[in-house]
Structures are given as C-alpha cells and as structure tokens.
Image (cartoon, grey):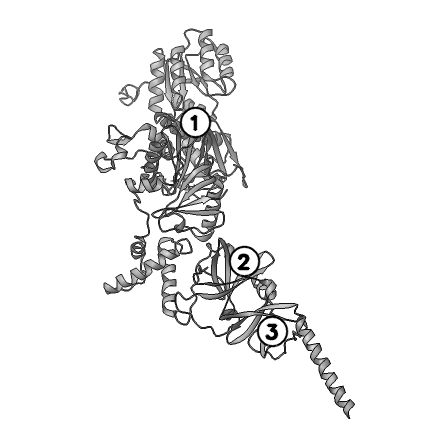
Amino acid sequence: MMERVMDTVTEENRKDKLNKERMEKIDFKMVTFSLGGKDYGIDIMKVKEISKADRFTYVPNTAPFVKGVYNLRGEIISIIDLRIMFHLPAEKKKEGVPENIIILRLDEYLIGVVVDTIDKVVGISSETIQPTPSLFGDINIKYIKGVVNHEGRLYILLDVDRILGAEREEVRKEIDTPLLKRIEEKVEAQDNHHAVDFSFIIDTLATFKKFTVNSINETWVRKRFDEWKSDRAYKGEDFQLKDPTEAEEYLSAFYSPYTGKFWAEEYCKAFESFLPEMTGGAFHVWNAGCGNGYETYSLAVLLKSRYPGSMVKIWAHDNDLLNISNAPNLLVNPEEVPEKYRSFLVEGKNGYQFSQAIKDSILFEYHDLLHQSSFPEVDIIVARDIVSFLNPSEQEKVFSEFMDKLKPGGLLFLGQNEVLNLEGWEMVDRGTMKAYKKEV
Amino acid sequence: MKTKMDFPNINERKAEGLKPDGTPYKVLVVDDSMFVTKQISQILSSEGFDIVGTANDGQEGLEKYKELYPNVDLVTMDITMPKMDGVTSLEKIIEFDKNARVIMISALGKQDLVKKSLLLGAKNYIVKPLDRNKVLERVLLSLK
Amino acid sequence: MRVEYINPFVESAFNVLREVLNSDIQRGELYLKSTSQPVLGVAAIVGLAGDVEGRVLFDMSKPTAIGIASAMNGEELKSLDDLAKATITELANMITAQAVTKLHELGFKFDLTPPAIFTGDNMEITDSKVEALIVPVILPQGKVEINVAVRERA
C-alpha cells in the first residue's frame, strides 16, 4: 500500500518537475495586449517598441483598417488598426487621447498597430503553445499562430507576418501613390450626409471648373466647404454648386495672392527668402501657367534686382492663347505699380512697357504643359494654382516633368493652397510660403 | 452703206504687249515653278506678248538668252532657283548684253536680293502673289 | 511656340489665301498638337532657319489641293498633276515668305529653305516629338491646316 502511494507521489513529483522544467525553459517571449476584450500576444522578436500616438496623417483611399501614417522620429510608417481589421468593437477614444501602438518590425519594414491596452511581456515555453481550436471565434483563423495558457489567462498568439505580409502589398501600393487618386468618400454610418454632400462638391468642381480634389488641395477644399456651407445657409441658399459661376465663387478663395497682378513688396520678400545668396552666371526659371504675364514680370524684376550680374532667363508658358498673347508687350501704368518696378519701365509711343533688358530675359510661349518641352534644366519652377486644374494622370505627368526639368536642390513653388506629398520632394516651410526642394 | 468695218469700235483698245509697230514684245520667262511660269505666261500672252522661251533655272535662262539673242525684249527672272539663282543669272546676262531688260520676280522676304538685283542692272521687280495689273504695269515700265 | 511668332503666320495665311483664291476664308481656332504629323493627305513643307529651326507644313486633303490649284490656275484640274503640285508648293512658299517678312520687321531673323511637297495615303513624316501650332483655315475647297513647329536655336 505504502508503495502505491509512494509511486503516486513520485509520479506527481515527476510531472511537477517536468512542468516546472517546461516553464523554466522560457524560449518565447510575447508582448501581451487586449483587443476587443480578449487577450492577445505577439512574439517580442517582432516588436520594435511600444508607443502612444495621437496624430496620424490620414491617407485617403486606403483600406479602412489603415489609420494613416505616422512620423516616428523621422521615419514614416503606416498605422493599422487591428480592431477594425478584425471587425472587433473598438472603443472610440476622445479627441486628443493617444492610442496605444505596438511598432512591429518585419524584415526591413516597420508598421504600427493600434490596440486597446498594452499589458506586459510574458515569457513562456514554446512547447506550451497549443494549436488553435477550429471553432475559434472573432478573428480569421489563419492569422492565429496558436493559443497559450499562462497564469490562468488564455492568450491568442497572432501570426503577425501573415497579417501584415499579406496586407502589406496593398497598404504599400496605396501609400506610394496617395496623391493621384480621387477621394472616394466612405459613407460612414455617422457621417453619411456630410460625406455625400462633399462628394457632390468634388464632382461639380471637376465638371464645372476642371478642378481635381485630392491630397494636393483637400485640406483647403474641406475647410472651404465648412465656410461655404455656413455662408450659403446664412444667405438662405443651397450649398450645392449648380453652375460654373457658383463653382468659380467657391474657388475664388483658392487662388494664390497677387494672381494676375504684380507681386507686392512683402510677397517678393517672402519669395526671396527661399533663393540662394548668390548664383553663378545664369539663373533659369520655368514659369508654368504664366497667364497674362504679371507673375512673370514680377519674377523678372525680383531676380534682376537680386542678381544684377547674372543672366536671368524665364521660360513662361500658358495654353490660353488669348491670355498670353498680350504678355510680351504688356502696357503698364507706372502709377499703379509698386515702387521697385518703376525703374524697369520705359516709355514708348503707346505707353510704358518693360525695358528691353527685362523683355529679353523672358520667353513667352504658347505651350501645353503636357507636351514635350525643350529648354535646359532650371533653378526654380513657379507653377501656382496649375496642377489642381489637371486630372490625376496629367498631374502625374507634370510632376515627373517638374522632377526632370529641375536641377537637384532646385525649388518648386505651387499655389498658396496646394500641398505636395510626393517622394523625392522635401517641403521647405517658411510660414507664409512653402516650396518643395528636389531631393539630391 | 456703212458696214461694221467702217465704224471704229470704241471698246477696242490696243493690246499692251504690242510694240508701236504692231509686233509683239518677245519675253523669256525664267522660273523654277511651273505654276508661276504658267501664270506669267498667261497674263502676258493675254495682252499680246509673245512668250518665246521658258527656263527652269538661272543656268538654263542664261543659255536660252544667248540662243535667242537679239530676239528677246524682256526677261522675267525668279530670284530663288536651284543650280543658279536669279541674281547670278541676271549678272551674267547683263555681262553678255548690257542692254538686256530683266525684271525680277520675288517672293516677300528677299528684299535685300531685290535691291542687289536693281543695283546690278535689273529694270524693275514684282512681288508674289502675282497680280495681273501689277505685272503688266511693271513689265511695261521695264520696257520703256 | 513663342507668342510673337504666331500672328505673322496667321495673318500671312489669311492674306495670301484671300488674295489668290478671291473668296471667303474662315479661320478656325488655333490649338497645339504634340506631334506634328500631317494627317490629311497632301503636305507642302517649307523649312525655317536662322534664329530658330523648324518648318511650316501645309496639310490638306487631295481633293482640297486639287480644288485650290484649280482655282489658282483659273482652270479645272483633274488630278494632282505636276502643275497642281507646283501650284500648292508656290502657295506654301508665298505664305511662309510673307510671314518671314513680318517676322523680320519684328526683329526676328528667320530664313526660308526651298519648299517640298509630299503626297500619299498613309503619310508618315516623322518629326521627333515637337509641339506644333495648328492654324486651321476653312476654304470653299476644304480645310487646310497650317502646322508650324519652331524651336529657338539653343
């Protein structure tokens, strides 16, 4: 009898010991967190860091689980909301309250995932990981590596590679060309009306004014929409754009300062702050969409004043013949121009025009931006309020042309309310004005 | 009874291309364009001029002139032609016959060549497109 | 194309055509084309040299060419024979020459090179991609596209 008890005890001890040994053989560590009320774990080898973040840059036209992109100490990474990806209930955090992020590293690729709460690092033996029961709930089973029991809690181990590898291609693809797709407003449950209204605005701007709404100008268009709606409500009018006139009115606030006019002193000064101190023998400019030439002459006067010893040459293009045909012989009233321009004017038989020196520095051409251009590399490109009036594929073409024609380190100036977020261009923000530098 | 022959026809006028003695002026047309040659020939022959020869370039023009000499009253000479241009041909014709009467036919844009021709001895010039009245006027001036 | 060059070509085309055809000419709206290939069937080309390089191309259909040549010769031509071709060539020359003169007056030193005429059904004159200004002119005999491609000499 005694022996049988002894056997049992020995057996128990042996099992215990085995268990202990198993547990002590900690060869797998995981970061645990909660998601939709359940406990999950991720292999710590895949985790770069844990963070909190509240400001993501929304990327339009991506899958709903892509929250956006985030600047992690200079590196731009995509942020995925696993709760949305797995269709789990997510507690909507208040504005400004940061989300919990786990930054994962997969090969060379960094990605962030939003979770409910982050718990702790748990060490286990990989032998204790059990295969996923087939009738498992919430998440698509292929994303689960297994389940593990630890100190009374059941953790679901996520196969991060699979989740993110498969989705990675889609996310990458979307993020690489964010600009050039139209915004398709998602009709969210809470924002139904607003979304539809806004998409009508997008359509009418495109139809009536050939204005493309996308990440280049979206911020402005949305802000304007709110302004426009309250303005129209106040007047007792409907905010939908019914004809080109109304569309033009909507867009009237879009245009850069001094459109169709000579640039005033402070605008010139702001522009000059971007220019190098000195320049070599020549300074070349491409003025795309120069219109009636006021902008071009402003540039010529500005540059000749700043670089008196250099050969300034401006290629000024527009595809509106009527507009540009008056530019070469523009008549000017000296009383109506800012002071600095007057010394560049000469009197002729029909009135005042710009001096031959100024005129010789400008080549006004009736030219379509989308056609082959033939001029050498330029130091700066001034294209204000032009790209917004091109369709997405035209925009792609033009930006690539800009990239080709600009010297490395050269600057691109877009419209006041236009923003560029494209690879190869670095934004230079001086407060009142922005420019984009071609990365060397 | 008076017949039609006796009454002078008030609508009758003298053909421009006839000399005082009633014989037609003889014209050599030098031009590389078939069309221009035809035009000049038509205008002139409709006024009684006699087109005695045509040439397609300055070289041929010079040779024909020498052949037909002295039975050429006027040469119409196109300025731009292959092989030998009108100015060179003019020069050589004048060399051959210092009394040669040559009138230059030019397209616009060749003013300096026209001036050169006049200095070399051409009597007058006509600018294309050819206008019938202008052609006749200048031709007659050259024949004085 | 440089703005200052446009009017001389438009005016010359108008003036010369009106004079030689003695009829109503209508000008269509100017536009830009990215490759300057002729499309209508008969092309008369005059080269440009000097401050610029390029050419002026007169593009029209065969029936239009025959019609214009007939009108200019004062007789019904039955086909695009030597006379008709010489006539169209001369027309191209006159228009370009007048434009060049106007450009001279504006201070631009252009020069003409002798014209050539090309005919064919599937013509392919390959200009390396050069932007062309198209001046469409509508005549009783049909449409003529005056196709100007010039580039500043670097």
> Which quadrant of the figure has residue C50?
top left
Which residue is depicted at the point 31% across and 39% down? A294
Which residue in the protein does label 1 denote? C51
Image marks 1 and 2: residues in contact by CB distance under 8 Å: no
Q: Which residue is mark 3?
A: A141
- Viewer can see residue B23: no
Residue shown at the point (34%, 22%) measured from the top left: B134
Q: CA distance from mark 1 to mark 2?
A: 50 Å
**Residue located beneath label 2 in the image:** A172
In the rendering, at what x and y percent does residue B136 appear? 35, 20
In this view, the residue farthest toward the left is A335
Type of residue at label 1? Asp
Q: Position of residue A275 (x, y in %)?
A: 39, 38
Amino acid found under the numbered disc labelled 2? Arg
Residue at mark 1 shares a chain with residue at mark 2: no
* SS for dot 1: loop
Task: Give the secondary structure at mark 3.
Answer: helix
* Image: A324 above or below A347: below
- In the image, residue A220 above or below residue B126: below
Judge by depth and name the residue closer to the eye, C33 or A136.
Answer: A136
What numbered label is drawn on residue A362?
none
Q: Chain of mark 3?
A: A
Badge 1: chain ID:
C
Q: Nearer the viewer, residue C80 or B119?
A: B119
Which amino acid, mark 3?
Ile
Label 3 Cα neighbours within 10 Å, binned few <14 / some 14-19 / many ≥20? some
Which residue is at the front of the view, A423 or A335? A423
Chain of the residue that carries numbered disc 2 in the rendered image: A
Inter-mark Cα distance, 2 to 3:
24 Å
